[in-house]
Every structure is written in structure tokens, then in C-alpha cells.
Amino acid sequence: MTKSQNISVIINGEPISASVPLRTNLVDFLRNQVGLTGSHVGCEHGVCGACTLEVDGSMIRGCLMLAVQADGAEITTIEGFADREKAAQLQLSFQKYNALQCGYCTPGMLASALEYIEAGGKADRAAIRQHLSGNYCRCTGYQSIVDAVVAVIEQGGKQ
Amino acid sequence: MKAAEFDYLRPSNLGAALDLLANESADVQILAGGQSLMPMMNFRLAQPELLVDLNGLEELQFIRQTDSHIQIGSMTRYCELETSSLIQQHVPLLSIALPHIAHSAIRNRGTIGGSTALADPAAEMPALLIALNATIVTRSREGQRSTEASKFFLGLYETALDSGELIESISIPKSTTGSACGFYELARRHGDYAMAGVAVTAQRTDPINDARVVFFAISDRAIRAETVENHLNGLSELTEEGLENARKEIDKLDFHGDLNAEVSTKRHLAKVVFKRAIEEMMR
Ligand SMILES: Cc1cc2nc3c(=O)[nH]c(=O)nc-3n(C[C@H](O)[C@H](O)[C@H](O)COP(=O)(O)OP(=O)(O)OC[C@H]3O[C@@H](n4cnc5c(N)ncnc54)[C@H](O)[C@@H]3O)c2cc1C
Ligand code: FES
Ligand code: FES
């Protein structure tokens, strides 16, 4: 029988209790049990960044944390970021600058970009690339993603 | 892939964790930041029967100072080290090197104890700890012991840790006036494991002394290059000739190739990173 444990978490502001199999990682729990399919799963070993989401205020890899480890934590996924000012600006900016094509990397890319901007990151292309270095995009070539992030920092979303 | 089944316990104090680790009948593994262990479990390279999660142990999360040392609890995360003013002030080498370790989301979870216990030959932390003359403090139910970093890393993923033992803290001498440091690594992408890297420290007195030169990602473990150090110690200033003599010794180190680069490439890159790290140290 699958070994499970009960957890209580707050996801995008909503308290949720569930029984999770011990071996289930956080992003699979969110996608398959909670139905929040915005966070993506690519490599399952921390390299691609598609599963990046926020736990207790830090951006982390959803594939490298067990769901049981999140017991008692506050989790924010791409579905919840939309309420944050800078995230909403980033989403518009990604559209405007064509910073996505297939969109597979986008939830993780937005999470990492949001972390950079909310920490007061400057509109410095090299620093932005360095911060986003943990997120793979196989479509855009990154240029347009950096454009979109720079625009949000420079214009505070007025575009 | 997904991890195989395991049992999971999250002890709330160090004593309880040590009791669980003392169980020799099961394959017990410590879970720290999970940034190396979880990938290994997802690949099924690791299939522990019981995971002992140390994330509930506040007693292993600290950065403190004594008159002469900085002490870091093993469950301290890279991101905490990056923003610590004690580290910036007293262990500048760590501050310079930390941004090169993986990516921000990995540094938000990964711990100094986890990287030290793993002893990946391409990881920065073992080399940094040897260059800093750090001491690794370990504990089991039988008690505590201390091991110099230069005697802790024994080979590929191999350390002086005994079964039933965990890393409790790491103690690093504070840098003093006159001490200087440099760090350089070459990686394919910022934050990836290095293809070759080096950490250097020395007393920039006249002449230079107490040089420590530690390479990583070139062998089966972080290696201290005493033959290279000997050419730096005693120099009044760093001449092109002195540097060239030191660089010649690099050829004789015990190089191992990996997926990134073969031995001849590593040998070349080791000289490049050495030159750049020394330039940074002498700036
Ligand atoms: C995409 C990616 C890129 C990375 N790039 C780099 C890089 O460039 N450089 C680098 O150095 N690392 C890199 N890492 C690895 C990262 O630094 C890990 O965080 C680190 O190697 C292990 O620390 P952890 O706390 O995550 O340990 P875990 O993964 O939890 O544990 C690692 C091992 O150490 C054991 N262990 C953990 N804590 C203790 C303890 N206190 N006492 C005894 N044993 C213990 C565990 O049982 C396990 O065997 C990368 C990881 C990823 C996913
Ligand atoms: S799925 Fe988590 S980093 Fe790729
Ligand atoms: S938009 Fe396709 S991977 Fe980034």
C-alpha cells in the first residue's frame, strides 16, 4: 500500500488539507491532486526550472521538494501570482515582447523574474540573464524574455 | 521519473535524529535541502528505505561568531549565507563564490551541510572549505568530533563521515588583516557545475605566505595543490616568472576527466582559472 501522510497547506490564499503519498513531490501534488496545472514539470531533477513556485516567500523547485515537506506552508503558484502587481505587469510585458512561444517554460520563468524584480533587481541585462540562468526556454532564445523583464523594471509596467 | 517508495520522518530535535540514524538495519538517508538527493531519488540512483528530514531542526540553522571563528550550522541554506553580514565581513571568499553555486531557486533550499556531505568533485563547497582551513564538526549518538576539511574529503562522493553520524556545523577561521582571496570557475552556463575551478587564499604580507590553492572539478575530489603553493610562498611580488613556475606544477596534478571535458582540456582550464583567481586575489 502506498504510504501517505496528511498535510495542511495554504495554496494561493486558500487553506487545503489532503492525504499525500510520501513519495509525491510538491509540483505533482499541486497538478494532480489539487488540479493546479499552471506549474509545469519538465526534467524532474532541478535543471529546467519549469516547476519553479513559491513556498513561504522563497522561489523553489517544485520537483525537488516533497509534498509532505510543505505541511504548514504557504504556497503560491502561477495561478496565485496574478494578484501581485509586478506579476501582472510581467504577464502583460511577456505578451507585448513575445517572450513566450509554446509557453512551457513561462510559469517558471515568470516566477524567477518575479523574484528578481521583487528583490529590487536592476534593469541590467547581464544580471537578469544570470538570475534566469536556472530556467530553460527552448523557444525564444531568451532575448525577448530579458526585454520583457527590463521593460517592467524601467517602466514600472506602464507600456 | 518518480522516486521509489520510502518512509519519511521529520524529527524535532537533534537527539531524535541521531537515534534514527543509528538504526543500522535499514538504509537510512538524511534529507537536507534535497537539491542533490531528490534528483538522485527521482532517477532511482538512490532508493533509501527511510528519509530523515533535518528541516525541522532549528538547532542546525545558525551563523554565529566567536573571537576567532565563524560557525555555521549544517542546515544553513546558501541563500542565508549569501545575505549574511557576518559572512560578508569575515569570510569574503564564501561571499564571492556563493553566486556561482547553482541557481537562485536551488540556493533557496540547498544547505552547506548537504554539499559538504555529498563531496561532489565538481562542487565549490569542499574546495572552499579546504582553502578556508575550515573544520567539519560531526555528531553521532556516541558524541561529537572535529575533522579538518583537508582530511574530510576522501574521494568521489566519499567523506570521513561514519555511519550514524551527521554534520552538525562548520567552523571557519575569520579572515585577518592581510589575508586575501580569489575564486574563479569556468562553467558552460552560469550556475552549472564547473568544468574547472579554483579557490585561493594567502597572507599578502611581504613576502606572500600561507598560500592555499584548491582546485575543484578537475579530479575525483577537491584537491589542494601544495606544490603550486610552494611557488607562491616567499615571493615579494607576483612576477610573471613566479606565476609561470607555479603554473608548471599544475600539469602534475592528478587530473580526472568527466562528461564535460577530458583530461587535456581540464589541464588547460585549470591554468586559466588559476591565473584569473590569482589576479583577483592580488587586485
Ligand atoms: C540544477 C542544479 C544545479 C546545481 N549546481 C550546483 C553547482 O554548480 N555547484 C554545487 O556545488 N552544487 C550544485 N547543485 C547541488 C546543490 O548545491 C545541492 O544543494 C547540494 O549539493 C546538496 O545540498 P542539499 O542541502 O540540497 O543536500 P541533500 O540533497 O538533501 O543531501 C545530499 C547528500 O548529503 C547527505 N546529507 C545532507 N545533509 C547532511 C548532514 N547534515 N550530515 C550528513 N549527511 C548529510 C544526504 O543524505 C545526501 O546523501 C546543483 C543542484 C541542481 C539541482
Ligand atoms: S521539473 Fe523541476 S526543474 Fe525541471
Ligand atoms: S516558450 Fe517554449 S520553452 Fe520557453
Image (cartoon, coloured by chain):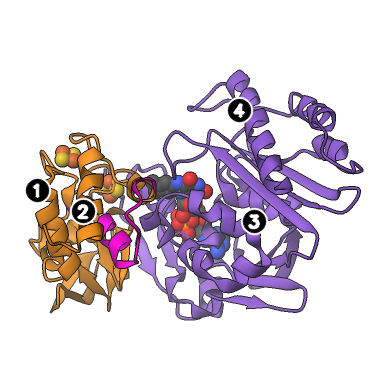
Chain colours: A orange, B purple
Residue B141: x %, y % from top left: 64, 73
- Nearest the viewer among B112 and A101 is A101
Query: Is there a contact, CB below 8 Å, between mark 3 and mark 1?
Result: no
Identity of the amino acid at label 2?
Ala
Write the residue at 43% across / 67% down.
Answer: B53
Residue linked to disc 4: B269
- Expressed as whole percent of the image width and height from the top left, the position of residue A106 reads 17, 49
Task: Give me the C-alpha separation between circle 2 and circle 3.
Answer: 34 Å
Are the residues under badges 1 and 4 in a single subunit?
no
**Residue located beneath label 2 in the image:** A151
Checking the image for residue A96, the label placed there is: 1
Distance, label 3 to label 4, CA atoms, is 21 Å
**Residue at left offset 31%, top offset 50%:** B4
Stretch in magenta: A107-126
**Which x, y percent locates residue B215?**
67, 39
Picture residue at 65% right of the left edge, 52% below the top: B128
Q: Tell me the SS state at disc 3.
A: helix
Q: Is the CB of the residue bearing disc 4 within 8 angstroms of ligand 1?
A: no
The Cα atoms of the two marked residues, 1 and 2, are separated by 10 Å
Real-space Cα separation, disc 3 to disc 1, in angstroms: 42 Å
Left or right of A17 on screen, residue B88: right
Judged from the image, the secondary structure of the residue bearing numbered disc 1 is: helix
For disc 3, the marked residue is: B93
Q: On residue B100, which mark appears?
A: none
Question: Who comes first in sequence, dot 1 or dot 2?
Answer: 1
Q: Quadrant of the N terminus of chain B?
A: top left
